[in-house]
Structure formats: structure tokens, C-alpha cells
Amino acid sequence: MLHCPHVMAKFLKHYNNCNMKEENIQRALHQYIQEHKICGASYAFLSDTSSRNYYDGTAGCIAPYHHQILEAGDRYDLASLTKVVGTTTRILQLIEEKKLSLHTPVSSILPKLQNNQICVEDLLLHRSGLPQDILHKETLTKDNIKDRIYAIKGSMDMYHKTCYSDIGFILLGFLIEAIDQMSLEESMQMHIFKRLNMHDTSYLCDDTKRYIPTEITIERGCICKEAHDRKAHLLGQSGSAGLFSTLDDLILFAQAILRQDEHLFHKETYLLLKQIEQEQRGLGWEKPYGCHVLYHTGFTGTSMLLDMEKKQGFILLTNRIHPTRHQTDFLEFRKKLNQIYLEE
């Protein structure tokens, strides 16, 4: 096929364009790191069958992290990437297994929930009317956090309107534990990570492995080897945040989505992931770049972008809130990188 001059020219143009986009992103990230706006980045450009991985900068800005050059195997706090890599994936599997449906009332499985109109699809689409977060988080403890979550009724005015909610995904985590009758760690290891050979993804930290630090706070010092998110930290394992993973493991997950791997979902579920959209949101995933592009970020500085039609993606892992969360221009910078990657 490539012996045809027209096809060969088209192939070379596409190949050169991809190389140029990736080089532009590499240069932009390297410059950003050199300007000390972030400490470093681990990132990959991938297709459904291959990837090009890069590590630039250091793990942190204080000892001992400022001497640690980033490398393969470094574990990042995924923050809200947990919502798609773990929670959304298992919920969709439970729907395939007929243990749930998109229209199942959440209170039918979690009777402590004060709101009986919210269904599973509402939580996945962030249209439940539940708030983004819990008020007065400083008063949360390990003993009261679950009761505080169940007591939240949400806003009737906001029901079926898009409002990003950590609370909704914590409830989805509770659903998984209730149906599978095991912890989130056990469920996700069994049904997701082991199926895809993701050996380095877990809620649990291994003292023999290297973890990338996140924020430095007065209350907790330099946060490392424990979830940055306060609610996830108190819960231990949460549907909204708290997973740790490596670039290599996330590539395995992303490639499974891109090639529609049946170890993860049936074909019909991949179709739902692509088709369902409301206010730039799909089932668990964001869709700011089109219905066929799955996207999600994590507060710590992580992101995954998957073009299901072109079968290619861009994963970016940083600890942009280290040492503090005040480096706010990173969010706009990341949008520009995504736009470069998606350019035709």
C-alpha cells in the first residue's frame, strides 16, 4: 500500500506532523521546567500499540527530592484521575455484569443516602445536584466523614445541571464496595489492574518504591506516600481520589481503551463512552475536545487525553502543586499543550 506515491506522501506528512507536535510539546515542557514553574514531568505520546515516554526534571524542590531525577517507575498521586482509571471503569463493568444499570437509584444500594432521586448516571455525568465538596472540611475526621457524606442532600435547583462533584464519585466508590463486598483496592486490583498487568497501581504505598511528593502544608508537612486529597486521606480508599500509579501503568490502561480491549469492557460499553455527552461530559470522563476525545485531570497535576477515533493519546504526570498550589498558570499551560497535540 505504501508503494503508492500518493499514500506514501500522505503517510509522511502525517508522520512529520506528529513528530513536530511532539517536539513542540517537549520544548514547551522543558522550558517550563527550566523556569522552575514545575519541578518535572513524566509524559507519553501513545497509540493503541506503542508509546514514546519522556522524563524531564526532578521529583521535587526540597531534599531529598531535588536530587532525584525523574525516571520510569516513579509513582504519582493521581488525584481525580482515580475517578476514571478506577471508579468509572469498575462501575461500567458492574453495569455490564447486570449488577447495576445507569438508571439504578443510588439509595437502593446505599440506603443511608438522604437523596432517593439520584441515579448512577447522574453521578457519572456530574449532574446529581450534589456539591463539589463538603463544607467545613477542617472538621472532618475518620469517624464522621461517611456520615457527613450520606447526610448531604444536594440542590434541587442544580439537579440534572452539570456541576463537578467529588461527593458523587465518593458515593460511586461506596457502591462498588457494597456490590463487590470488598474494598476498592481489592475490587480494582481484581477487575482492572491485574487484567491489564498494571502492577504498580494501588491505593496502598510500598516503602521500597519511589513516590513523587505533592504539596507542603503546615498541617501535614511535605505530603508523600499518602493521598493529597483530604477526604481520600481520611477514607483510606476513595472513589474520587487516592490512587497512585506510574506512567507505564497508565499507558497500559490508555492503550486498553484505545484498542477497545475486551479484558476491560465489551464493545457496547466503548460505544457508550464515545456517544454519551452532556455539557462536555461523558460517563466519568470530560469531553472538552469533542465527543470522541476522553479527557480527565487530577488536582496534583496529572492528566490523560485519549482520541478514540485516531487511537492515540497524551498522558502528562506532574506534581504541579509542589511545593504549593499557587502556581495557577499551569492549568492554562496544559490546555495549550493539549491543543498542540490535537492540531491536525
Image: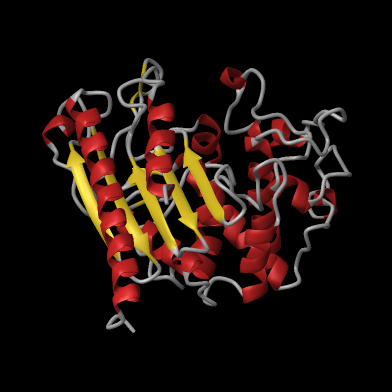
Q: Is residue 331 above or below residue 98?
A: above
- For the point 30% across and 54% down, the residue is 17
Could you tell me if residue 19 is visible in this image? yes
The answer to which of 55 and 319 lies nearer the viewer is 55
Q: Is residue 278 above or below residue 148?
A: below
Quarter of the image where one finds residue 330? top left
Percent x, y for residue 103? Answer: 83, 57
Total labels: the figure holds 0
- For the point 40% across and 34% down, the residue is 336
Q: Is residue 104 left or right of residue 17?
A: right
Could you tell me if residue 208 is visible in this image? no
The answer to which of 161 and 150 lies nearer the viewer is 161
Q: Is residue 27 left or right of residue 152?
A: left
The answer to which of 113 and 60 lies nearer the viewer is 60
Q: Is residue 35 left or right of residue 227?
A: left
Percent x, y for residue 323? Answer: 30, 22
Percent x, y for residue 254? Answer: 44, 61
Q: How is the image coloured?
A: secondary structure
Q: Is residue 54 left or right of residue 168?
A: left
- For the point 49% across and 33% down, the residue is 229
Q: Is residue 314 above or below residue 333?
A: below
**Which residue of the protein is positioned furthest toward the front in this rendering?**
5
Quadrant location of the N terminus?
A: bottom left
Percent x, y for residue 87? Answer: 58, 53
Q: Is residue 237 above or below residue 57?
A: below
The answer to which of 252 and 231 lies nearer the viewer is 252
